[in-house]
Amino acid sequence: VDLAEVVVEAEIFPKIFLCLKDADQFVRKHAATVVREVAKHTPELAQLIVGNGGVGALVEYVSETEGNNRLPGIMALGYIAAFSETLSLAVISSKGLPALQHALESEGEDHLKSASVWSIGQIGRHSPEHAKAV
């Protein structure tokens, strides 16, 4: 958590979301990895990502990438959605479910399918309304 807070204090948000669109696939993947690693620690850090437009950027990233490059984006959406109904709703309203469904249907490797299912489960677990959206 301490390192995640140091990263946030360096004021990388929302600038890092521009890296999710970089021409270099390694820059894109590592930017998504940083977002995932920050998002998983606390609801406040996840809210910071949501508040800076990070969910939309992550959804777009998951939609545009393939294979293992997709994994950090898929997991970041799940970590964000896991914390609260409100954060989960942010993923739903940013069209996160269709992106995760596409990843589930199009990826051939089991660990990517598993991550997609896990993230979808995190979105739907909060209430009947969330489950209905799933």
Image (spheres, grey):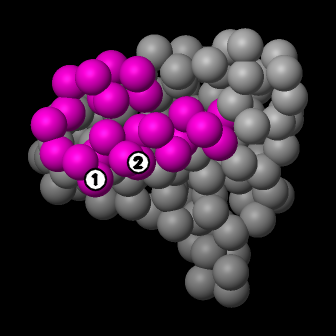
Dot 1: element: helix
Quarter-wise, where is residue 87 in the image? top right
Residue 96 to residue 111: above or below: above
| 70 left or right of 99 in image | left
Dot 2: element: helix
Q: Position of residue 16 (x, y in %)?
A: 46, 50
Prevailing secondary structure of the magenta residues? helix
Residue 85 to residue 110: above or below: above
Does any portion of residue 33 appear in the rendered image?
Answer: yes
Kindly identify the residue that appears in the image at 17 percent across and 45 percent down. Answer: 109
Q: CA distance from mark 2 to mark 1?
A: 6 Å
For badge 2, the amino acid type reads: Ala
The mark tally for this picture is 2
Residue 119 falls within the magenta-colored stretch = yes
| 56 left or right of 92 in image | left
Q: Name the residue that disc number 1 marks.
A: 111
Q: Position of residue 55 (x, y in %)?
A: 58, 33
| Camera-side residue of 48 and 59 | 59
Q: Name the residue that disc number 2 marks.
A: 115
Q: Which residues are magenta?
A: 100-123
Residue 113 falls within the magenta-colored stretch = yes
| Camera-side residue of 35 and 73 | 73
For badge 1, the amino acid type reads: His
Kindly identify the residue that appears in the image at 71 percent across and 48 percent down. Answer: 82
Quarter of the picture containing the C terminus is: top right
